[in-house]
Image (cartoon, rainbow, N blue to C red):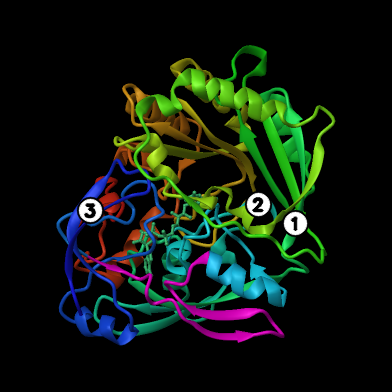
Amino acid sequence: MLWKETEYNGWGRVLKATGRMARPEKPSALTGIFTENPCPAIGSLRSYGDAALNSDGDAIQMTRLDRFIGFAPETGILEAEAGVSITDILSTFSPQGWMPAVMPGTGFATLGGCIANDVHGKNHHGAGTFGDHIESIELLMADGKVKRLSANRNKDLFRATIGGLGQTGVILSARIRLKPCSSRMIQVDERRADSLAEFMGMLETSTATYCVGWIDATAKGSALGRGILEEAELTSSNMTPKLRKARKIPMDAPSFALSPPTVRVFNKAYFNRIPEQGRGVLRSLEDFFFPLDKIHDWNRLYGKRGFHQFQCVLPDETAEETLTEMLRRISNSGLASPLAVLKRTGSGNAGHLTFPIKGFTLALDFANANGAEELVRGLNRLTANAGGRIYFAKDSLATPEDVAGMFPEMADWQQIAGTADPNRSFETDLTRRLKIRGKK
Ligand SMILES: Cc1cc2nc3c(=O)[nH]c(=O)nc-3n(C[C@H](O)[C@H](O)[C@H](O)COP(=O)(O)OP(=O)(O)OC[C@H]3O[C@@H](n4cnc5c(N)ncnc54)[C@H](O)[C@@H]3O)c2cc1C
């Protein structure tokens, strides 16, 4: 197999790594190197920070291992290699009436990446995480052997692999349960929320299958936390979506592109485009689930210095007070970008380190400008003090102290990961930075 010295980065482009990378096309090529040199697998590098980086070490990019292995149209069970993307699954199977039961906000994420971060979607409150829809996983272990994992077979390792940040082995393939869909379109209803309290109330009482909020993180005073709620249902429609070719950002944007006045003006216009009485629109599944994928490399909009993403989940009991304080700090900082999302989350624990708990999740981007690191570090501390969690897929700035205590099953997970990978061959920059694997 060919190794190539490569410089690569997380999606936020702040954290980078240099090391040898291989991109095998056959699973057999992988088993070959593993007996001598087990190393972490990475997907399409859509994690924002350093979850998929291995500085000065080796990494195996799985994106060429992207074959569908089998599909049972009577049950919707799909078996696929780990490098298959969520978009590939959606565009291949939605014309046949099936779609992934849970999808993150980008279709570029791979099956392996979705399992390793146990991703959630706009239907978490009803459908749980990606890991709740997995039948079985084929895992290449550090000793070169392949194990099949499921809820009945190697069940501790199965749970530790779901959301396990690639620390138990390389996911070669998985069998997942798709859900039925009657067309490739979705009916979306959009309504304005004028304040945080109103927004949270609307999210809490929504009965929609898919529910997500855009939040104006520049708003202050009585408008603090205002935004737009999107509620959506799969629908029957004869329409075939017109999928436009994705556009490219040809270069890094200049620093004024997302300056505070520009963002304020944009956010105001974005909020006001929804009439007071709300509106309904029919969208393609791709448009609704992956709105940012229409612009390739949109991460270049933040300029050369890149950006940080912050995502927390807060339990119901502390959510309103903590979100108010977070949004107050963010709007006062003038550092908010237009990309800010508020969602409701349900309970669920498909994996030991699964991120969502019952409550509310807030996600925001901050250009890597002066003051941004300090702001995000403060938000991380607020999250820890409120009994919440930060999301490893997005994080680039948390400390081991911030995350200690966020995941009650961490000790059990460390023990299972330690047995699966005693030499810590699968450690990444994130697991080292946050000391997630525990003491040696
Ligand atoms: C625009 C955008 C929107 C997003 N929206 C959401 C969202 O709504 N919900 C959500 O939960 N996440 C969301 N994310 C985050 C994204 O879904 C996750 O970071 C996902 O894990 C990325 O998949 P990937 O294939 O790029 O994996 P990478 O980022 O390359 O890797 C992620 C982790 O998975 C491990 N890994 C990857 N492949 C394998 C494998 N085959 N075997 C073992 N370990 C492996 C890596 O070691 C790493 O720890 C979003 C990201 C973007 C850029």
Asked whether residue 405 is in view, the answer is no
- Residue 7, above or below 158: above
Asked whether residue 337 is in view, the answer is yes
Q: What element carries label 3?
A: loop
Label 2 close to label 1 by CB (< 8 Å):
yes
Residue under numbered circle 2 = 288
Residue under numbered circle 3 = 439
Percent coordinates x, y for residue 440 in the rendering: 19, 57
Q: How crowded is mark 2: few (under 14 residues within 10 Å), some or many (20 or more)?
A: some
**If you read the primary sequence from the N terminus, does the residue marked by circle 2 or circle 1 appear first?**
1
Q: In which quarter of the image is residue 280?
A: top right
Percent coordinates x, y for residue 100 in the rendering: 62, 67
Q: Is mark 2 on a helix, strand or loop?
A: helix
Q: Kindly identify the amino acid type of the residue bearing the numbered disc 1.
A: Ile
Q: Which residue is drawn at 49% across and 55% down?
A: 354
Task: Between residue 166 and residue 195, name the one nearer to us.
Answer: 195
What separation in Å lies between label 2 and label 3 (alpha carbons)? Answer: 43 Å
Q: What stretch is highlighted in magenta?
A: 59-86
- Residue 153, above or below 415: below
Q: What element carries label 1?
A: strand
Would you say residue 64 sits in the magenta stretch? yes
Of tags 3 and 1, the one toward the viewer is: 1
Residue under numbered circle 1 = 186
Does mark 1 have its CB less than 8 Å from ligand 1? Answer: no
Q: Kindly identify the amino acid type of the residue bearing the numbered disc 2.
A: Phe
Q: Kindly identify the amino acid type of the residue bearing the numbered disc 3.
A: Lys
In the image: residue 136, left or right of residue 112: right
What separation in Å lies between label 2 and label 1 (alpha carbons)? Answer: 8 Å
Q: Which residue is drawn at 80% across and 60% down?
A: 235
Task: Between residue 281 and residue 361, name the one nearer to us.
Answer: 281
Find residue 375 and name its label: none
Q: How crowded is mark 3: few (under 14 residues within 10 Å), some or many (20 or more)?
A: few
